[in-house]
Image (cartoon, rainbow, N blue to C red):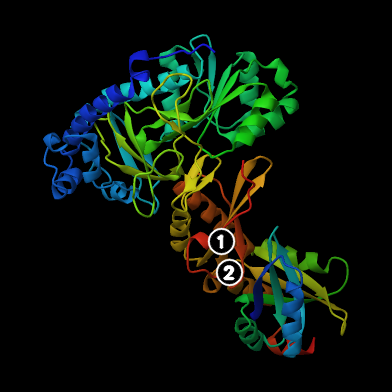
Amino acid sequence: MEIKYWNKEFETLDKQSLKKLQLARLKETVSHALRTPFYKARLKKAGINGPEDIKTLDDLKKIPFTTKDDLRECYPNGLLSVPLDEVVRIHTSSGTTGTPTVIYHTGEDIDHWTDLVARSITATGAGKSDVFQNMMSYGMFTGGLGLHYGAERVGMTVIPIGGGNTKRQIQLMRDFKTTVLHLTPSYMLHIHSKIGECGFSVKSLNLKKAYLGAEPYSENTRGKVEDLFGIDVYNSYGLSEMNGPGVAFECVHKCGMHTWEDAYILEINDPKTREDLGAEKEGEIVFTTLTRKATPLLRYRTRDLAFVHKGECKCKRAHRRLSRLTGRTDDMLIVNGVNVYPSQIEEVIMRIPQVGNNYQIYLEKEGTLDKLIVKVEIYSKMFGGDLGEIEALKEKVKIELRAAIVINAAIELHEPGVLPVFEGKAKRVVDTRQKL
Amino acid sequence: MKLTQISVFLENKQGRLYEVCALLGKNKINIRALTIAESEEFGILRIVVDKPDAAMRVLKKNGFVANLTDIVAVEVNDHPGGLAGILKVLCANNVNVEYMYGFVEHSSDNALLVFRFEDINKAIKVLSKYKIGIVGKKDLVNL
């Protein structure tokens, strides 16, 4: 199999050189981080007053972890390490309890990120002769813009359609002979069920590859999609705190996602003991950015669980390979590729006086797509006896939830005392979805 | 004269309507008129009973979501055009009906019409002016 590189020098660095590069870049990142009030205080406490206090990569362990809560507390600009003049873009993601997290990018940061995505696309064997239909959402969600920039840099013909509108997606795939898709696995399966309805067959399309991400899925699902469409499927991993997509991506060998270790330090951490784990042991993914100036993050705990594959990849890239995600350390839900915390739903319910404080989050499959149902109880004292009023209340809950979690939920109103009463948040979630 | 209607919020669940009716029956509360407004997953049961205060107490005590609404009940001769006659008067006097429901009485030749008006006081004034028989609380027991 022909191996294509985007940036051969950095992709094929030997282990020693990679470590040397990481150390140099870590020092730089620490000095950037020290310009933010948050890290200045935190690093000082840990005895790090300047990059000279980082002598070896082992010194990374002296640096305390950064959590999503830290990011929330720093909202909006506590982690900005350059003057705003140098910032060219802001991405925010939903916070666990309403406060979002924000990542700033300088022009150079975007450039680095774009290059990592271009590298990822190239590693899958795609190139400038491909037509790339980007079916991930654009906007604040990094999945759309991230791949878009990288694909343009590679020179692909990009169709920036974003998510949704299945019939139009299929029409465009046919009309422009799309070869590469980027979307969630559940949407990919949904597309398959709709191709026939549009009067086309899978064979009439020119699809060759799909990048599936933003949702966990299994090897079985990969196999199923590959068989259904007659294409190659590549797994993709990223998170907005680490720019977005292009953090780890599979190469043509499809044996785990190469984590671009010249741009990120990857640690796999025992969630309980915080011990660094070796290959093939499942733990929490912890990342340190190495090339981002505007928002450097040190030892960021992703709450994603995975492990690192053992051994070398046939593609000769030294960058270690990350497994499929095996779970989360928190109660985050992934609904059609969108991250949702039960606490965000709870917060919305708590501020609507017409519904009681008890609620239940129900997840099920509608075809291959996820359906989120939020069950709430009507608050007796607010009941006015009017049907229209209750329909309006349902609509209000739906609209407020949509504003908070960017998903359309189905709202079910119940009589008080019907829903089970729980202490913990997690138990309020009933997930009947079959794993992809 | 205003009467009280009880609205009960009910989930669409098997046996739920039975439970309300059984509860009222056990407490010797008689339903004089009834209607259900429904959506896909829930309904609102609207009833006019002989003892609204007692009914409310029992319902609340048993965990039902219920509320009281002022309505006007009118007796009309049970013949073709009876309801139209009343509506014509209401219409001519700009009295808006939010909803209504009707029953045929078995003890007389009359029909009982229950109205929820946008402006109940204006409605009573108009109905009285046109000498349309409004049902009082006592009448309700003897219907």
Identify the image quadrant of the N terminus of chain A. Answer: top right
Residue A411 place in picture, x, y as percent: 59, 55
Residue drawn at (46%, 12%) of the image: A4
Q: Quadrant of residue B77?
A: bottom right
Answer whether labels 2 and 1 touch (C-beta < 8 Å): yes
In percent of width and height, residue A112 lies at 32, 23
**In the displayed structure image, the side of residue B134 where residue A13 appears, left or right:** left
Q: Is residue A85 left or right of residue A4?
A: left
Q: Chain of mark 1?
A: A
Q: Is residue A326 above or below residue B116?
A: above
Q: Amino acid at mark 1?
A: Gln
Q: Is residue B112 above or below residue A158?
A: below
Say which residue appears at 75% left-offset and 26% top-offset: A196
Give amino acid for label 2.
Answer: Pro
| Chain identifier of the residue bearing label 2 in the image | A
Mark 2 residue element: loop
- What is the x, y in percent for residue B12? 71, 65
**Observer-nearest of A288 and A273:** A273
Secondary element at image label 1: strand
Residue located beneath label 1 in the image: A360
Q: Is residue B136 above or below residue B67?
A: below
2 or 1: tag closer to the N-terminus: 1
User: Mark 2 = which residue?
Assistant: A420
